Amino acid sequence: MNQLPRITDSFRGTQAPRFHLDIARILAPGRSMIRRSAVVLFALMLTCGLAAQTKNELEKKRAALDKQIKTTTALIEQAKKEQRVTQEQLQLLESQIQSREQLINAMGGELRVVDQRIGEDIEMVASLEKDMVKLKEEYARMLQFAYRNRSAYDRMSYLFAASSFQQAYRRSRYLAQIAEQRKRQAALIEETRSTIDQRLAGLQDQREEKAKLMGEQQAQRMRLDHDRSGQQNALANLKKEEGRLRETQKKQQNQRRELDAAIRKAIEAEIKPKPKPGAKPGTSAKLDISLTPEAKVLNADFEKNKGKLPWPVEKGVITSRFGKQPHPVLPGIVIENNGIDITTEKNASVRALFRGEVSSVIVIPGAGKAVIVSHGIYRTVYSNLREVTVAKGQKVDTKQTLGTVLTDDNGSVAHVELWKISADGLIKVDPGPWLFRD
């Protein structure tokens, strides 16, 4: 009975501090290592999420370009069946080349993302391997400590050596923390090992994906060369028909002028100028752009949907954009387009861009018919129609069919314009940015 106090006293003086220091040496670096490894694993998951988001965006862009190229290819094949090279066919080839170049650039962006992910994964695996070594070292020290102090006598002596009940409680918690940390360390080692294996497997998948992308990109480059060759052949054939093209150009220019005048006349007829108080007779008055409450809501909704409006045809390619542009064949000739031209399929339906009211139906001799739809202070114009299926004053919904596209020697081309009414006059607006883009 007299021996136990002496052993306890001895432990209080020598073994207890060493035992306590061993615990401190194990707990401190172990906690630090666990925190660092947890941060690395969290950063790894975050990086994976961001990389996946970038990859999805690029794949979505590539899919949209693929769809556009397929539509253009189908329209080019349709034009070839006519056994005659036209200006529209040349413009389709130009659009095809631009889409193909964008697709190749998009694939290049995907390749850069894959290369970046491969580099990041290689660095991450190296960092995780280093962490694995340190984790195993810390775990080995824990096991050594557990082995040295495996007897219940050592643990009890460590507790009895406490100078107070509070200190004994803290020491009891230290021992429990060591056991818990040993479990966490073992779990973290297993998790890190699993993560390394996953990243290594991912690296193999990414290298295969890169090889596939490079093959597809090379195939697109070959198709691009073929498109350029076809464009040069078409251009050479069209230059042989310069006389016919100049006659067609003059005819189209006159038709554009007639359409412009007819649109102005139709819009100005429905909006009477507002007389200015005290103005002298003969002076031009401001246009009355006051709207009903219903028209104000319609106008606001139309403006909110800029960039979201549906295309006026189900399938088509923009072959001539808004504004001045050089003639694709005739040197020195500049075309001024008040809207956009969309080459589409034969007998394609032309649809309303947005809900509104048909304010006018116009007939252009030799150029088909046109429909004007009112959306507050905006007017959308749909011309080069063979048939019209709506009447003046009729309410129409978004994507409702207005008519059928006219097909002539240049193919099936829907012409769309956007006009804005201001107090000072009529403004022509580029409809391109208002249409939805994939």
Image: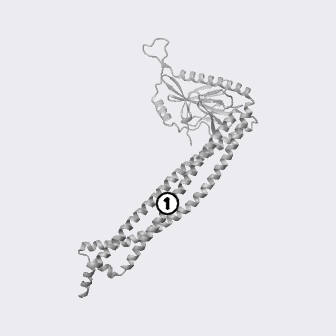
Q: What is the quadrant of residue 211 in the picture?
A: bottom right
SS for callout 1: helix
Is residue 33 or residue 74 the one in the foreground? Answer: 33
> How many numbered marks appear?
1
Quadrant of image for the C terminus: top right
The residue that disc 1 covers is 124
Q: Residue pushed farthest right? A: 83
Quadrant of image for the N terminus: bottom left
Is residue 236 or residue 370 the one in the foreground? Answer: 236
Judged left or right of residue 304, residue 65 is right
Is 159 situated above or below 373? below
Residue 30 placed where, x, y %?
A: 39, 68
Residue at the spot 76% in from the left edge and 36% down from the top edge: 83
Residue 36 placed where, x, y %?
A: 41, 62
Is 45 situated above or below 218? below
Instruction: Report crowding for label 1: few under 14, some 14 to 19, many 20 or more residues within 10 A (C-alpha).
Output: some
Amino acid type indicated by mark 1: Met
Viewer can see residue 432: yes
Residue at the spot 34% in from the left edge and 81% down from the top edge: 152
Residue 268 placed where, x, y %?
A: 54, 21
Q: What is the quadrant of residue 200 in the picture?
A: bottom right
Q: Residue pushed farthest top? A: 281
Is 421 situated above or below 172? above
Residue 82 placed where, x, y %?
A: 75, 36
Viewer can see residue 397: no
Is residue 378 or residue 73 the one in the foreground? Answer: 73
Is residue 265 or residue 142 the one in the foreground? Answer: 142
